[in-house]
């Protein structure tokens, strides 16, 4: 039951995220994105099968799902989503809901060296955008990387929000994104909350994907720009779509895609669906 449920909720979350008008990111709102949207859905389907395989370790599920998606689709469509959602899916499959966040923390704390190596190998194999711009400690292309998964995540957490989730046990999701999402969803609508949460993540910190590819200054500029657009979004009473489309045009003109904020959005949608269906404590 938990395996079937996890597969269903994960796939639905990935597909729902594609329906959100996310400035700078792919969605069903743009005809030019249709080709990529189909591939994102295909990536969600492929990864859902592997990530929910019973008795497969966390490291193996991340590596094999990332590799299969990359091999079949020819590019990176969902590494960030896999990295963030895989630990959550493992907790869901194990059926330990008495304290979901504690179980997630315990799982992340107990990642063994060989499992950590598989996660790093997944990153190395898929080569997410901008990964080759970093040459210091924690560079997955270095042979010596295998020594300490935790230390590499700790180093990466200074600028990479997915690494930070592994280090602080998803604090950005549980303490920032998810509570705000649930509150907005209950006060307004799911559609509004979906659009808001993406802007909320982008205004909260520098997007890791933009930072890897274009540097901290550019990522910081976009974060500040998003704060401006988020205020307009919150204060507007009539046509939020126009605000989102204006911001989208701005980002696409600069070829900037806040991909990590989209990954965080998928993860938030997944946790919200889990809370709606299963009685859990976080």
Image (tube, rainbow, N blue to C red):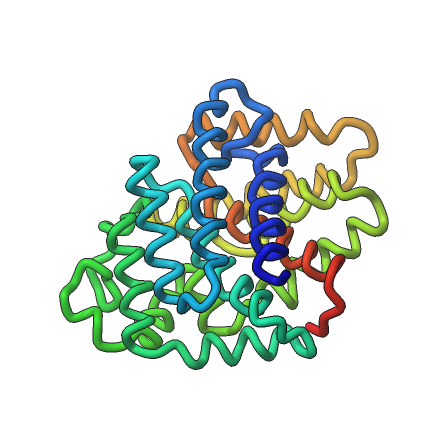
Quarter of image, res 71: top left
Work out whether residue 217 can be spotted.
no
At x 55%, y 31%, the residue is 27
Quarter of image, res 173: bottom right
Please give left or right for residue 138 compared with residue 96 in the image. left
Tell which of 95 and 63 is nearer to you.
Answer: 95
At x 70%, y 43%, the residue is 231
Quarter of image, res 193: top right
* Count of residue discs: 0
- Residue at the far left in the pictured view: 143
Question: The N terminus lies in which quarter of the figure?
Answer: bottom right
Tell which of 145 and 49 is nearer to you.
Answer: 49
Q: Position of residue 144 (x, y in %)?
A: 16, 70
Question: The C terminus lies in which quarter of the figure?
Answer: bottom right
Q: Position of residue 11 (x, y in %)?
A: 56, 45
Please give left or right for residue 154 compared with residue 95 in the image. left
Please give left or right for residue 243 compared with residue 159 in the image. right
At x 30%, y 56%, the residue is 122
Tell which of 279 and 136 is nearer to you.
Answer: 279
Q: Looking at the image, is 226 positioned above or below residue 117?
A: above
- Residue at the far right in the pictured view: 187
Tell which of 216 and 118 is nearer to you.
Answer: 118
- Residue at the far front in the pictured view: 1
Q: Looking at the image, is 33 positioned above or below residue 52?
A: above
């Amino acid at each position: 039951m938990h395996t079937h449920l996890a597969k269903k909720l994960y796939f639905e979350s990935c597909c729902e995220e594609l329906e959100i008008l996310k400035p700078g990111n792919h969605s069903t709102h743009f005809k030019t994105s249709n080709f990529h949207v189909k591939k994102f859905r295909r990536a969600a389907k492929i990864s859902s099968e592997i990530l929910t395989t019973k008795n497969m370790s966390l490291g193996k599920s991340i590596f094999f799902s990332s590799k299969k998606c990359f091999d079949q689709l020819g590019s990176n469509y969902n590494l960030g989503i896999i990295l963030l959602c895989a630990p959550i899916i493992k907790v869901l499959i194990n059926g330990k809901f008495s304290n979901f966040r504690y179980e997630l923390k315990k799982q992340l704390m107990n990642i063994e060296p060989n499992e950590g190596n598989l996660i790093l190998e997944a990153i190395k194999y898929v080569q997410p955008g901008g990964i080759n711009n970093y040459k210091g400690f924690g560079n997955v292309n270095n042979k010596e990387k295998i020594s300490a998964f935790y230390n590499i995540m700790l180093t990466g957490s200074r600028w990479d929000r997915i690494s930070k989730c592994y280090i602080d046990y998803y604090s950005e999701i549980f303490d920032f994104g998810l509570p705000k999402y649930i509150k907005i969803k209950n006060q307004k609508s799911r559609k509004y909350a979906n659009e808001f949460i993406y802007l909320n993540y982008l205004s909260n910190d520098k997007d890791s994907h933009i930072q890897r590819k274009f540097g901290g200054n550019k990522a910081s500029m976009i974060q500040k720009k998003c704060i401006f657009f988020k205020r307009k979004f919150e204060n507007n009473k009539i046509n939020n779509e126009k605000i989102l489309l204006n911001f989208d045009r701005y980002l696409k003109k600069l070829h900037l895609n806040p991909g990590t904020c989209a990954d965080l959005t998928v993860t938030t949608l997944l946790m919200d669906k889990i809370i709606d269906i299963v009685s859990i404590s976080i």
